[in-house]
Amino acid sequence: MDLATALGADSACIARDAGLDTSLLEVPDARVPVAVFYQLQREFLLQTENPDFGLLSGRVTYMEAAHVLVYLASASTTLRDWLNLMPSVSSLLGDLGVIKITRNVGEFVMEWHPEDPPQAKRCLISDNILSTTALQMDSYCLLPVRPRRVDLSYPRPENIDVLESTFRAPLFFNQPRSALYYDRKVLDFPQLHVSTRIYEAVEEEFSLFFSSDNSASDPFSLALHSAIRRQVPLGGGSIDSIASHMNISRRTLQRRLKERNTNFQQLLQSVKSGLAKRYLQENRLSVIEIAFLLGYGDPSSFSAAFKTWHDCTPTEYRHDSLQSRPRAEHGSGLIQDSD
């Protein structure tokens, strides 16, 4: 809606004509009916008169998901690891469709499979999904990751300048599926690990989960915590999967945990509980995003678990945390309006 306004359209008019209740825009984690969402796309195209609206909105979607994907990158070693974590957040696409990855000789393909069959005209949603995905693929590796080919399910538009500048790859129109093709060698590219407020102070985080005062400098504890953080978004996190990830036996893992006066379930719950509190205090991730990051298939399951840990819902905890946080004073700033 902000993008439509920036392009000169009347967002109130768009909402009215699409049948959108604008009060939903002020509700965190609100859901919009699919029919209304599709009508919104039609109104965006009609009232902005910009056929590249889907590509431009992909930039917005890319930024909206940045916090989740930076976390997944921090929990990954290579692009392959990062892609393996992506199914855990695929539900963020709602009921629109899914991205499926297939393999060919020397390449892999990210295909967009919408719930509704592709139409024989330009689709803003397909443009959005592909442009968002292309931006994400090129943002979280230490090396550039660019598609070698882009398939689009609609006919070639009269002007393809924005399409070419967005994908910087050969474009093929009237294809059965919209898809991005990548060289398989990029799967081994190392991931970018960014130090931000959400992911810093790792030693402090470790000390919350282990009883020993020197646990943060204990190589085994560090490796175990790292393994759990990587497995949690996958929805797994069983003692067997963690032991396998660390290349040790289940029995060895249990013995070493016992030496540190804890057990696996207690540790796993502590990790999830601690991460949940940290994310909720930051107010940068939605409750839905946090649920997927912690391996829960839906927000209600996460909310039920959180309530057993802290005797309140995630939304209540976030509200109380933000209410109790001191308000920052505004400085004069470095850039000011001229007189």
Image (cartoon, helix red, strand yellow):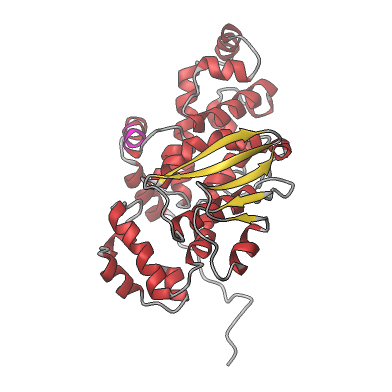
Q: Would you say 94 lies left or right of 162 here? A: left
Q: Residue at x 67, y 55 (%)?
A: 170
Q: Quadrant of residue 192?
A: top right
Instruction: State the predominant SS element of the stretch in magenta.
Output: helix
* Residue 161 percent across, percent down from the top left: 62, 69
* Residue 126 percent across, percent down from the top left: 48, 54
Q: Is residue 295 magenta?
A: no
| Image vertical order of residue 181 relative to residue 125, above or below | above
| Image vertical order of residue 15 relative to residue 125, above or below | below
Q: For the C terminus, which image quadrant? A: bottom right
Q: For the N terminus, which image quadrant? A: bottom left
Most extreme residue toward the top, as rendered? 251
Front position in the image: 243 or 207: 243
Q: Would you say residue 135 is visible in this rendering?
A: yes
Q: Is residue 303 magenta?
A: yes
Most extreme residue toward the bottom, as rendered? 339
Front position in the image: 175 or 216: 175
Q: Would you say 209 lies left or right of 144 here? A: left
Q: Residue at x 55, y 10 (%)?
A: 254
Front position in the image: 174 or 245: 174
Front position in the image: 210 or 103: 103
* Residue 80 percent across, percent down from the top left: 64, 34
Q: Residue at x 40, y 49 (%)?
A: 321
Magenta part of the protein: which range?
A: 300-304
Q: Would you say residue 276 is visible in this rendering?
A: no
